[in-house]
Image (cartoon, grey):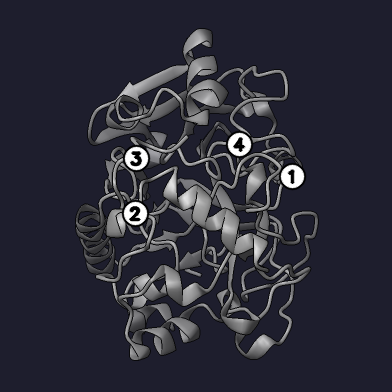
Amino acid sequence: MRGDGGAGGPGRVRGNAERGGRGGDGESGGHADGGDTGTARRAAGPGGVREGVGRRGMLRGLAATGAAALAAPVVAGGAPAVAASRVVSRSAGPFEVLALLDARGTFPGKLRDRFSGAAEEDWRLAERLDPGSFGPGGTWRLDFRCYAVRRPGGRITLVDTGIGPAGSPAAGWAPVPGRLPRVLAEAGIAPSDVDSVVLTHLHEDHYGWAVGPDGAPAFPEARYLLQRSETAALDPADPAMTYVVGPLRRSGQLTEVEGAVRLCGGGRRGGAVHLRPTPGHTPGHQSVLVDGGRRRIVVTGDVLVHAVQLAAPAVAYAFEQDPATARASRERLLSEAHARGSLLATAHLTRPFVRPGPAAALS
């Protein structure tokens, strides 16, 4: 997802980045184990809108005309919801997957304008699947969430790094500052515990805390993994190049991978963590499969950004760079997840863990 209005500009999503709490979607907070329980190349997007130029201007204008600024999440009909848990945990074999809430806010403009191909029945089902994302006046409430995979021995793979501090590239439209550093501390994770950081893609709400205020990598012991096709497609003028890709290359911590990669294993108990290419939202978008054997969890990134795409996977998001490829990636990921009974760990739904398929997601 991306919606850059320019640093400090009027395209900003407003929300409760500083608020925590418990319970938002029935998940447990803290460390409770649920048991079972820069943009890529500026190419033309949907309708000929140029990525990183047309979208920036459009979101800037939408925010200027009055995107909702809410201090608490809302459910369908405008009723306030309980604030989301900052840390929610699920297990998959030897792995613990922790959802880390960096921020919550309201996206500029109207929700339905972002998914114009959705039918009324799709919207009705989406509202049942994720009521917290439906704000008053047709607005879109969304979370900005990262994930940590804790492996046997306590080492951590971090998936995405959120919207970042007040001066990050997301500042023009996202509810900065995010709170990821504090949430990591709440989860008992120190920067030195993180030995790998997977960036699903190079939109600024996914790499904001990858580096510190001084430009140094925020996780000194980690290698940062991106698909080579993502960095190859990056416009040299994109903020991602100077904010994150350049510093990581200079520190020697950037690892560019190609295709599906087995990242690490689960030790004696088996299982593995895999990187899976899921292009379309950006050229090198990737998701993360945590395969614990009997249970699998898929960290989706922006393969799906709203529950309407869970209800109807063919529905495109307005800012996908290649909608046809994004649709194919989404349908393939959801089909495989449904067949294997996998959980989906989502970046922007207000429920961190959901099941694929409309019927399963409601269970």
Q: CA distance from mark 2 to mark 3?
A: 29 Å
Using residue 262 as the reference point, say whether residue 246 is left or right of it: right
Which residue is labeled 1 in the image?
177
Q: Classify 262 as above or below 351.
A: above
Mark 2 neighbour density, 10 Å: few (under 14) some (14–19) many (20 or more): many
Q: CA distance from mark 3 to mark 1?
A: 33 Å
Q: Are marks 3 and 4 in contact (CB under 8 Å)?
A: no
Q: Which residue is at a point 41% across and 84% down the rendered structure image?
A: 123
What amino acid type should be assigned to the residue bearing mark 2?
Glu
N-terminal-most mark, 3 or 4: 4
Using residue 128 as the reference point, say whether residue 14 is left or right of it: right
Q: How many marks are shown on the rendered structure?
A: 4
What amino acid type should be assigned to the residue bearing mark 4?
Pro
Would residue 46 be seen by someone viewing this image from the given angle?
yes
What amino acid type should be assigned to the residue bearing mark 1?
Pro
Which residue is labeled 4 in the image?
169
Which residue is labeled 3 in the image?
272
Q: Classify 347 as above or below 27.
A: above
Mark 1 neighbour density, 10 Å: few (under 14) some (14–19) many (20 or more): many
Residue 36 percent location from the top left of the image: 47, 68
Q: CA distance from mark 2 to mark 4?
A: 19 Å
- Observer-nearest residue: 145 or 45? 45
Mark 3 neighbour density, 10 Å: few (under 14) some (14–19) many (20 or more): many
Q: Which residue is at a point 54% across and 63% down the rendered structure image?
A: 352
Q: Are marks 3 and 1 in contact (CB under 8 Å)?
A: no
